């Protein structure tokens, strides 16, 4: 059996995460493709103030890790990846958002190129899907982001910050996310470019709920990402005097 | 004269109260700070000497000299503290991550998994 870890970082998320877990669990149990995997869901609670203990209903395998304080999604992802890589000895890795905007149904398409050995990492791309349901202002912000990302990372990807990814162990071993907050999505691409990993993207559908829009990255978030990236450029990996 | 006296009074009162409430070890550093303020105060009262130095290095007024020097020091301090903050954040991240990795909560069925 091939070992697969699905890493889901979350912060102050309860109802949507629980619903997402249930859908995921049902899908993992039903879908033929995923029967070949020994799947573990790795939840990373990034210091939530709301105390909750999301879990599975059935007999699936789940591990919950907890940051004592809130560090940001990038930090939580790295914690989950480290655990899956070194403790669970996973061969395949998937990262997913906690609010259910990524659909379990897209998992096989995302995983297949990695499992087949055609790519080291696959990024979900919401614009490749037939039914694109991105609100228009959001679409323009994302479009600007895509151009910027191409310029910064050199990777030719059509979706700037989509957290739905699948990758193999080689990628996981080289993953060293330093940007704790939202700019990690750019950093992951920089790592892929640095290590010359084979990458590609597959269409995924994003379900934007009112809640997702309110809670997820606001359009202004793009500016914060820019600030973090600049900060990293100047101040990263400097040790104190 | 009156405004500078006013400022000096506030400064002296603040310094005196701070000094009284400080722990003994911190008092030496505090005295150094007082010395710096005293020096600035002296320069404020006798600006002519400072102006001479300023015009010698090619800056018009003594006050400008102080402002330029202060700006250099402050900008330098800002960048040093940003670097330190970044280093501190990365140390804090590894610490929190290690604690998380050491305490996994497995509510799973091992045999089935």
Image (cartoon, coloured by chain):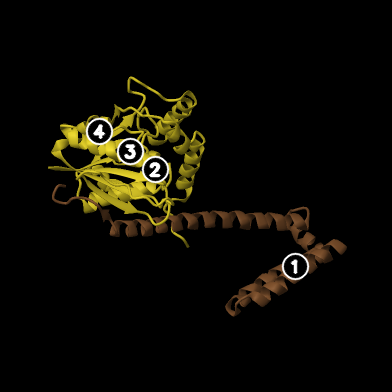
- Residue in the picture at 77% in, 62% down: B50
Q: Nearer the viewer, mark 2 or mark 3?
A: 3
Q: Quadrant of residue B62?
A: bottom right
Q: Which residue carries the number 4 mark?
A: A107
Which chain's residue wears label 1? B
Same chain shared by disc 1 and disc 4: no
Q: Which chain is yellow?
A: A
Gap between marks 2 and 1 measured at Cα = 47 Å
- C-alpha span from label 3 to label 4: 17 Å
Pick the front one: A160 or A76: A76
Name the outermost residue toward the bottom. B24
Lower position in the chain sequence, tag 2 or tag 3: 3
* Disc 4: host chain: A
Q: Secondary structure at mark 2?
A: helix
**For residue A140, side relative to residue A8 (left or right):** right
The residue that mark 2 highlights is A184
> Residue B21's x, y, as percent?
65, 75
Query: Where A85 falls versus B20 (above or below)?
Result: above
Of the image marks 3 and 4, the number of the one nearer the N terminus? 3
Q: Confirm whether residue A117 shows in the render.
A: no
Which numbered marker is on residue B11?
A: 1
- Could you say which chain is coloured brown in the image? B
Residue in front for this viewpoint, A210 or B23: A210
Q: Dots 2 and 3: beta carbons under 8 Å? A: no
Residue carrying label 3: A19
The outermost residue toward the right is B1
């Amino acid at each position: 059996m091939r070992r697969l870890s699905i890493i889901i970082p979350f912060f102050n998320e309860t109802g949507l995460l629980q619903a997402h877990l249930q859908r995921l669990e049902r899908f993992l149990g039903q879908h033929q493709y995923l029967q070949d995997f020994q799947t573990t869901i790795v939840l990373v609670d990034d210091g939530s103030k709301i105390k909750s203990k999301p879990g599975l209903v059935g007999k699936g395998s789940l591990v919950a890790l907890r940051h004592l304080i809130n560090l940001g999604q990038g930090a939580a992802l790295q914690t989950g990846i480290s655990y899956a890589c070194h403790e669970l000895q996973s061969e395949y890795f998937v990262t997913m958002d906690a609010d259910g905007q990524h659909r379990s149904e897209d998992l096989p398409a995302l995983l297949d190129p990695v499992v087949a050995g055609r790519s080291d990492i696959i990024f979900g791309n919401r614009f490749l899907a037939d039914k694109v349901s991105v609100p228009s202002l959001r679409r323009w912000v994302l479009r600007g982001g895509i151009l910027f990302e191409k310029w910064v990372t050199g990777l030719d990807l059509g979706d700037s910050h989509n957290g739905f990814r699948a990758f193999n162990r080689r990628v996981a071993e080289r993953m060293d996310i330093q940007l704790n907050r939202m700019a990690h999505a750019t950093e992951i691409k920089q790592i892929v470019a640095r290590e010359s990993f084979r990458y590609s993207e597959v269409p995924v559908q994003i379900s934007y709920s009112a809640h997702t829009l309110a809670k997820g990255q606001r359009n202004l978030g793009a500016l914060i990402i820019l600030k973090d990236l600049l900060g990293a450029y100047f101040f990263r990996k400097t040790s104190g005097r | 004269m009156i405004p500078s006296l006013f400022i000096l009074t506030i400064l002296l009162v603040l310094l005196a109260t701070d000094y009284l409430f400080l722990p003994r070890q911190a008092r030496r550093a505090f005295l150094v700070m007082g010395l710096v303020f005293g020096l600035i105060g002296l320069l404020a009262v006798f600006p002519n000497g400072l102006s001479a130095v300023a015009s010698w290095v090619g800056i018009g007024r003594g006050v400008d000299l102080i402002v330029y020097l202060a700006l250099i020091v402050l900008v330098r301090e800002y960048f040093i503290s940003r670097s330190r903050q970044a280093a501190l954040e990365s140390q804090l991240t590894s610490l929190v991550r290690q604690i998380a990795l050491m305490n996994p909560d497995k509510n799973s069925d091992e045999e089935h998994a």
